[in-house]
Image (cartoon, rainbow, N blue to C red):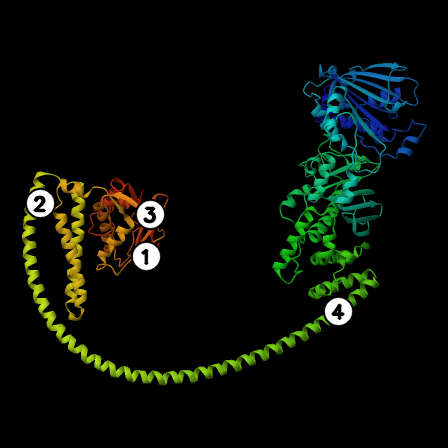
Amino acid sequence: MRFKISSALKDLIGKDLITNDNVAIFELVKNSYDAYATKVEITFEEDKIIIADNGKGMTFNDVRDKWLFLGFSAKKDGSEDRDIKNASYRDNIKRHYAGAKGIGRFSCDRLGKKLLLSTKSSLSSHIEQIYVDWGRFEQDQKTEFAQIDVEYAQKETGILFPNNGTTGTVLEISSLDKKSIWSRKKILELKRSLEKLINPLSEANDFEIEIICERELEKDKEERSNNKHDRDIVNGILTNSISSILNIKTTLIDIKLSGSRIYTKIADRGVDIYKISENNIHFSELKDVRISLYYLNRSAKVNFTKLMGVEPVNYGSIFLFRNGFRIMPFGAPSDDSWSLDYRAQQGNRRFLGSRDLFGRVDIITDNVEDLKEVSSRDGGLIETDVSKQLFELFKIAHRRLERYVTGVLWGEAFLRRDYFHDEMEANEERRKLLEADKMDESPDYVFSSSIGSKIDFIQLIKTLTKDNNVEVLYYNKELANILSNPQVSEEIKPQFIADLEKIAIDMNDSDLLFNIDEAKRRILELQKANELAEQKAIEAERKRIEAEEKARLAEIAKKEAERRRKEEEEQKKIAQLQAKEAELRRREEEIKRKEAEQQKIEEEEKRKKAEEDKKRIEIERDVEKSKNKYLVSTRNITKEAEDILHTIKISSNELSAAAKNISRELESISQSQKIREDLDYIFFHVERINKLSKLLTKADIAILKEHTKVDIAEYIQEYLPNYKSTLEEITFHIDFTDVVIKKIPLLDLSVILDNLINNSVKAGASKIHIDFAKEHNQLIVDFSDNGLGVDLEKFSPDVIFELGITNKRGGSGIGLNTIKETMRRELKGDIVFLGNGLHYERGATFRLTFR
């Protein structure tokens, strides 16, 4: 029994495995590289792609026994170069293989249905050709793979290899996949990807890739005339010029692992920060690795974009290269194969993510199985001991760069590690650092001014010197110099000077030890001087306090003498006043006796007048009752009459209150003046009732409701004092000087004011305050009292204006409704409830608006 291989296997290892067109071309270019080519030309024609190289080519046996041998890799079993007599290829070029799976050749199937392969080796005198129609493998999957023939032919001439090479391989792929149209945009995307296929930061320059597309020449010419960047031009040899700018404008870490030693250097914008060497005790599987990471501040990102024509975030971040060729998808935009971004999101300004970094990881190996890609070609690495150690070494490189950037350049530890005595000072120093780091193209601002950065750098170097496996080869003494300024040195905590002293001892730096001793001496002198100055200040302060105390006691004695003199004068004046008061009391008693006689006469007259008034009122009341009975039987009460009757009720209540006041005041004859004021108030409301009683006809009401031009603010200030007997205080405030004249019916305004005063009194108010304001052509009147206010738990601000809604037990609920309707209908205005406790600590505030 044996396995049989279906022709459908071609799809599995061809177009199904190679995920996109760019990856397919990558695989074919890698094959050219492994064939020691120095140049590859990729030509786009109508329905054809030609990939030509000047590599070592293949013999007939190579084509038959290697290229057509499915899954066989001569690179993997070591037979790739066995038949080459001239070994100068690998000796001169010094390359390691980029691929070794034996399936990359099937990328041709991804690009087109037909393939014409032409190749010539230095061992052959003619050109070998095979023609493959991939469609034949798709006709019947029951047909065995090996049963489908591939056409073969020989040619003597007619094939040109790049750079006039005498050997090489040409792949002509035709009947291109209709789903993949090679537009200008797509070819440019391929070009930009190929720029990163071979290490763009590599110092070697022994492999060229050129793209040729005649139909895009005119467009290229137009783009060049518009000063477009090279990455926007289709035709030409791929170039990359990023490394020079990164060495000048960025903060970088460079790690080289070579056998048993690891060398690390950090440089900041052209200035070396530190260099260390350590034994390779943790990465036994790694033999030749280089890691170069660049932190890009805002200035570096701007320079990157100017040079490359694309922002760093859209170019890529940290690429992985095996034997000089890129492994996908490491470094692709939005890719986080290095597992940096999730961690960076956890701490603002504490960690570096892929958006902050650019760089490469290079590993050289003779056995590609040690660092093996997944078969899909863009899925990353298969986990091996080598890949795990490579990731761990990368982590060390990233953390060391991150420690310098976030600690020294950003001041992340200023507050956390108590570098400063004051939290505010630490935050301010860190703010200055972050602002300077954005655009500075030199690290001088850190060296010259930031004492916090210097202290943090000392802590960094101290940590390195404590590691027995690490040898510090160099550190920047200017950055570590915290002793240059004596005044600043005095403020530094002693532990940081001790840390610097330990570094000097570990590094056997006699000059630094001498400077530390000098700094200690200066600090001691400054401390003594400060202590002496402080003692002098204390003594001066003591003398000043003593002098002030003497002056204070003298002032007290002076004031005491003055007080005794004034007391004696006061006693003398009191004696004189007592004599005068005795005389005044005698005269007052005489006046009171005469006033009592006069008051008795006046009270008798008032009693007679009151009896007469009472009889007159009773007569008028009987007449009014008769009239009311007649009106009730002949017609319904109108809204205007209802308002007047409500006002009459208010005035009656006011009369009742005033009468009670008189009754109480009569108990004390000495308050005769207050009694007269209350009687005048009663007279005002009696006259008001008499007048309103006569107005209960529609004709009279129409006259009163005629619109009259009036200064409303002035009218209210004259009208409300009539209630001074009922209220303790009525105050006004007006914030404008001009006169606001409105044409309104005065009766309606009076009814509104009476209703508001009555509501306030019923709510227990003793004070009323009126605010006048003017907005555009509107008069605003805010009416406030210090009563109980509106019960907002029972009523909303809108509901209290509805008919029948009352805030008081026994109320009718027509007062506020009357005011609301009158303001809207007659006065072309409105009334709203503003709230409780706005002017006084409690009490309601209503706003009247006159348009």
Label disc, if present, on residue 522 of the rendered structure = 4
Disc 3: which residue: 780
Residue 120, by quadrant, is top right
The amino acid marked with disc number 3 is Ile
The amino acid marked with disc number 4 is Arg
Q: 462 or 651: nearer the eye?
A: 651
Q: Is residue 835 above or below residue 539?
A: above
Contact flag, marks 2 and 3 (Cβ < 8 Å): no
Q: CA distance from mark 2 to mark 3?
A: 39 Å
The amino acid marked with disc number 2 is Asn
Q: 204 or 470: nearer the eye?
A: 204
Q: Residue 439, image x and y in percent? A: 69, 46
Q: CA distance from mark 1 to mark 4?
A: 69 Å
Q: Residue 749, image x and y in percent? A: 24, 47
Label disc, if present, on residue 628 of the rendered structure = 2
Secondary element under disc 4, as helix, strand or loop, is helix
- For marks 1 and 4, the one nearer the N-term is 4
- For marks 1 and 3, the one nearer the N-term is 3
Q: CA distance from mark 3 to mark 4?
A: 75 Å
Secondary element under disc 1, as helix, strand or loop, is loop
Q: CA distance from mark 2 to mark 1?
A: 41 Å
Q: Quadrant of the C terminus?
A: top left
Q: Residue at x 25, y 81 (%)?
A: 580
| Mark nearer the viewer, 2 or 3 | 3
Q: CA distance from mark 2 to mark 4?
A: 110 Å
Contact flag, marks 2 and 1 (Cβ < 8 Å): no
Disc 1: which residue: 842
Q: Is residue 387 above or below residue 579?
A: above
